[in-house]
């Protein structure tokens, strides 16, 4: 089966043109047409000198001369490869008149059809712009690297000059102070140290000092990592290093040593030596540590004093405010009883006095429990207790208070579950949560439930009251914290109820959490306790 040369020509991966002996275009394959953004019909029959006329006149003249060097006089069997030519072309989606730099090469040769027709010229057109750009980038990078290498050499020379100056300064300083000098050879690990250097480290002048002995044995174990990291970092950065560490002398006395050093480098940037000096700064360091300890102690004392003062102010203000209201009510109704003879006033006064007396009693109990918790004297006696039954009893105790306020007390599931608890304290937890819900709920309902989840019992109290802002949830269990209702009015209490709940639950090895969708969305409190097994 004969080969379709036309189809093969179309599929060639390179861009090709076929020219006649007058250099007019006979054929162009698909790769060439795509590269130039042309159709064969656009250029067929045109002279190669006349197509793709872009760029400046000077570029066009260069292109003509370039083609002249590749086409005329081409002999059979000869192949010519052109030099590079910059010839700008329009890019796809580019505005009219705008050109993009391109670099070109062509390869030309004679094609003899062998069927009696005149010989033709094959021209392979190559866009080498990308390779030229890559070559230019490589040249710039090489130039940059050469510049950096020269800069490094300059820095090394400057560092060596600086090192010589420092050595002279060090020599002069050693003559006037009891400073120990040392030099470490990183290749062998040997350390040449002066007698004073060895004395500072707790050695005798005849002892041999090595890198391993100095940094892995003499330096206190608690300081070794810090000392080695400081030295390694400084050497990597070509900087001086200064570090303080402890050494223990043969007489078991602990001394603080200041170690300073600097790396010396060879011309090939390898580390040649590390030189430095040691200084015993024990007296200065002990005074510094003592002053730091005194400053920290004074700071803690001031902070504690300020905290105690704030807590005391808060406490006095809260107690004064909360005690004044029930005491005022009791005194007012007592005075009324003394002056009024109407029997109807007696019953009403007795109720008011009793209610406020109970309020005062709860406040006093909370204050006593608060003091016991603060001093660590509050304890619990844990015994098996049915949490569901206990919660139901507390709910009945508080039902009248809730209904008097116009609230509906809903007792949901009270699953029978036994936990290890102090019964009176567990009642106090349930009572505080329920009374707190009633207190901060103006209307709607309060719901109590006890459920079992795996090996845990959960007591939950949900209300439809004023709710809790998200930023207040984190502080709700702190002492003296109260969340005011939407009206902004203050609710009676010392702000100890939930704080007591939190500590009592902790004593029962449980946890308590608060949830609320925000102001006006109610709140839910959950107490989680381990089941008794």
Image (cartoon, rainbow, N blue to C red):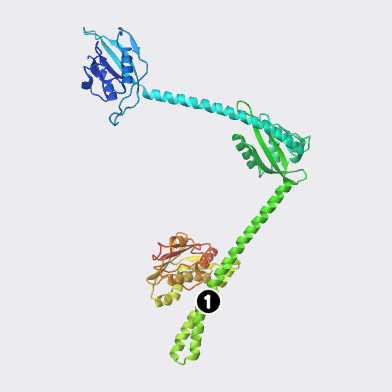
* Residue found 37% across the figure and 71% down from its top: 444
Q: Nearer the viewer, residue 504 or 404?
A: 404
Q: Residue furthest bottom?
A: 341
Q: Nearer the viewer, residue 292 or 164?
A: 164
Q: Circle 1 sits on which residue?
A: 323
Residue 176 appears left or right of 533: right
* Residue found 45% across the figure and 88% down from its top: 345
Residue 530 appears anywhere in the view: no
Please provide percent x and percent y for residue 53: 27, 21
Please provide percent x and percent y for residue 364: 55, 75
Residue 388 appears left or right of 190: left
Quadrant where the N terminus sits is top left
- Residue 307 vs 21, above or below: the answer is below
- Residue 419 vs 236, above or below: the answer is below
Please provide percent x and percent y for residue 300: 62, 59
Label 1 Cα neighbours within 10 Å, binned few <14 / some 14-19 / many ≥20: some
**Figure quadrant of residue 93:** top left
Please provide percent x and percent y for residue 302: 62, 61
Residue 34 appears left or right of 310: left
**Figure quadrant of residue 398:** bottom left
């Amino acid at each position: 089966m004969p080969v379709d040369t036309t189809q093969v020509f179309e599929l060639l991966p390179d861009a090709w043109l076929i020219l006649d002996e007058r250099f007019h275009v006979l054929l162009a394959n698909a790769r060439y047409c795509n590269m130039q953004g042309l159709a064969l019909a656009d250029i067929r029959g045109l002279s190669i000198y006349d197509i793709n006329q872009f760029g400046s006149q000077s570029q066009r003249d260069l292109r003509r001369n370039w083609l002249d060097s590749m086409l005329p006089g081409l002999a059979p069997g000869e192949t010519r490869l052109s030099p590079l030519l910059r010839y700008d072309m329009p890019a796809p989606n580019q505005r009219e008149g705008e050109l993009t730099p391109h670099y070109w090469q062509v390869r030309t040769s004679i094609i003899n059809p062998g069927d009696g027709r005149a010989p033709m010229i094959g021209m392979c057109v190559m866009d080498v712009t990308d390779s030229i750009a890559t070559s230019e980038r490589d040249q710039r990078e090489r130039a940059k690297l050469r510049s950096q290498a020269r800069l490094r050499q300059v820095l090394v020379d400057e560092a060596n000059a600086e090192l010589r100056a420092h050595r002279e300064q060090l020599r002069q300083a050693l003559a006037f102070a009891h400073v120990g000098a040392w030099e470490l050879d990183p290749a062998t690990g040997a350390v040449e140290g002066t007698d004073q250097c060895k004395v500072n480290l707790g050695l005798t002048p005849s002892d041999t000092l090595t890198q391993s002995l100095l940094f892995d044995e003499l330096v206190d174990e608690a300081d070794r990592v810090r000392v080695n990291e400081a030295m390694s970092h400084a050497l990597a950065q070509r900087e001086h290093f200064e570090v303080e560490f402890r050494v223990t002398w043969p007489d078991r006395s602990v001394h603080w040593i200041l170690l300073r050093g600097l790396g010396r480098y060879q011309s090939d940037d390898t580390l040649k030596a590390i030189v430095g000096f040691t200084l015993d700064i024990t007296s200065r360091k002990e005074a510094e540590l003592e002053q730091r300890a005194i400053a920290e102690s004074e700071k803690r004392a001031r902070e504690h004093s300020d905290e105690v003062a704030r807590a005391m102010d808060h406490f006095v203000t809260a107690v004064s405010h909360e005690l004044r209201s029930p005491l005022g009510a009791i005194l007012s109704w007592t005075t009324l009883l003394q002056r009024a003879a109407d029997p109807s006033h007696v019953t009403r006064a007795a109720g008011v006095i009793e209610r406020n007396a109970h309020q005062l009693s709860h406040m006093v109990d909370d204050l006593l429990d608060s003091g016991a918790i603060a001093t660590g004297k509050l304890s619990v006696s844990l015994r098996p207790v049915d949490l569901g039954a206990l919660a139901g009893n507390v709910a009945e105790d508080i039902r009248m208070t809730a209904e008097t306020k116009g609230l509906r007390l809903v007792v949901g599931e009270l699953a029978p579950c036994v936990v290890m608890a102090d019964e009176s304290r567990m009642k106090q937890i349930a009572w505080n949560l329920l009374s707190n819900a009633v207190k901060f709920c103006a209307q709607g309902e309060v719901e109590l439930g006890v459920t079992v989840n795996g090996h845990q019992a959960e007591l939950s109290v949900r209300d439809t009251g004023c709710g809790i802002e998200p930023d207040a949830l984190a502080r709700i269990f702190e002492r003296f914290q109260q969340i005011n209702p939407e009206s902004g009015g203050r609710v009676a209490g010392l702000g100890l109820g939930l704080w007591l709940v939190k500590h009592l639950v902790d004593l029962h090895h449980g946890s308590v959490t608060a949830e609320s969708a925000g102001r006006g969305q109610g709140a839910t409190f959950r107490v989680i306790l381990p089941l008794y097994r």
